[in-house]
Amino acid sequence: MNVRHFFLVPLLTVATLHAADSFPLWPGDAPDALGNADKDTPTLTPFLPDQPAQSGAAMVICPGGGYGGLAHHEGEHYARFLNERGIAAFVLKYRLGSGGYRHPVMLNDAARAIRIVRARSNEWKVNPSRVGIMGSSAGGHLASTLLTHFDQGRSDSVDPVERESSRPSLGVLCYAVITMGQFTHQGSKNNLLGPTPPKELVEFLSNELRVTKETPPCFIWHTWEDTVVPIENSLHFADALRKHKVPYDLHIYQQGGHGIGLGTRDWKSADRHPWTADLVFWFKAQGWIQ
């Protein structure tokens, strides 16, 4: 397989992630909504395997798109791939900078998605202690933000969803934007924080600076040929995990440009990028799949 011929998807590819069973994250208007149009309504789309893994593993998936769009192949395609392995998947349509939103709206959407999967775990045959998050490019920034900025929920909330922890059980970061500093992707930063964010906010959302011993284990991969999101994003995050003794797998592949997803146009194809086999191996090591 020659990974040089993987298709490239522009960072701001926009695709509709709705499906028949998509549902809004909140009843009524979402917190801080600017309206009630589609762009103002974050949703979750479940993709459930025919035979869930015995562990009941689940992943919330954050597609990339520079915080300006959502890349379909980094959403449903990943979900179908995970379903093949018995893992339940939930594709998140989060609000975007192109729709007028800024931090912390995106983080709140991701946190709500994790809480929902836990709150409805019986319905979906999910183990609430095995709910992870997966993100690509800017979606990887959102995933890494939740991995480093989670909370334990509010036990006194009248909303049972809000009582759940937003801490992912583990993370999968695919050619992710991690930092808002020197090695950031500028378009993602502008869409998330605006053109002139305060220094304190830039540091707060440079997630390599926010790792602690409580950060969940992570699978991280990037490519040397990526000219859109610098490889330092993954390297520095992995180094921070190492310093805090958080388990991780780091894979740097030589070939493949930014946005390659599974490495094939058809998620059903067996001609996938090697990262998928490495991820399956890592999931097995975590006890998430047989």
Image (cartoon, rainbow, N blue to C red):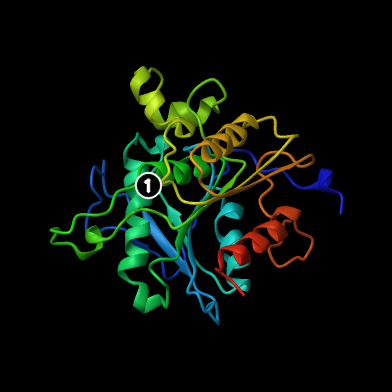
Q: Is residue 273 visible?
A: no
Three-letter code, disc 1? Lys
Residue drawn at x 66%, y 63% is 280
Residue 191 against residue 4 in the figure, above or below: above
Query: In this figure, which residue is indicated by the disc labeled 1?
Result: 39
Residue drawn at x 34%, y 51% is 111
Q: Is residue 77 visible?
A: yes
Q: Is residue 81 left or right of residue 89?
A: right
Q: Is residue 35 left or right of residue 156?
A: right
Q: Where's the C terminus, which quadrant?
A: bottom right
> x and y percent of residue 8 in the render?
71, 43
Q: Where's the N terminus, which quadrant?
A: bottom right
Q: 94 or 142: which is nearer to us?
A: 142
> x and y percent of residue 220 in the render?
61, 46
> x and y percent of residue 101 in the render?
34, 36
Residue 86 against residue 35 in the figure, above or below: below
Find numbered disc 1 in the image and state the secondary structure of the residue it sits on.
Answer: helix
Residue drawn at x 58%, y 39% is 238
The image quarter containing residue 13 is: top right
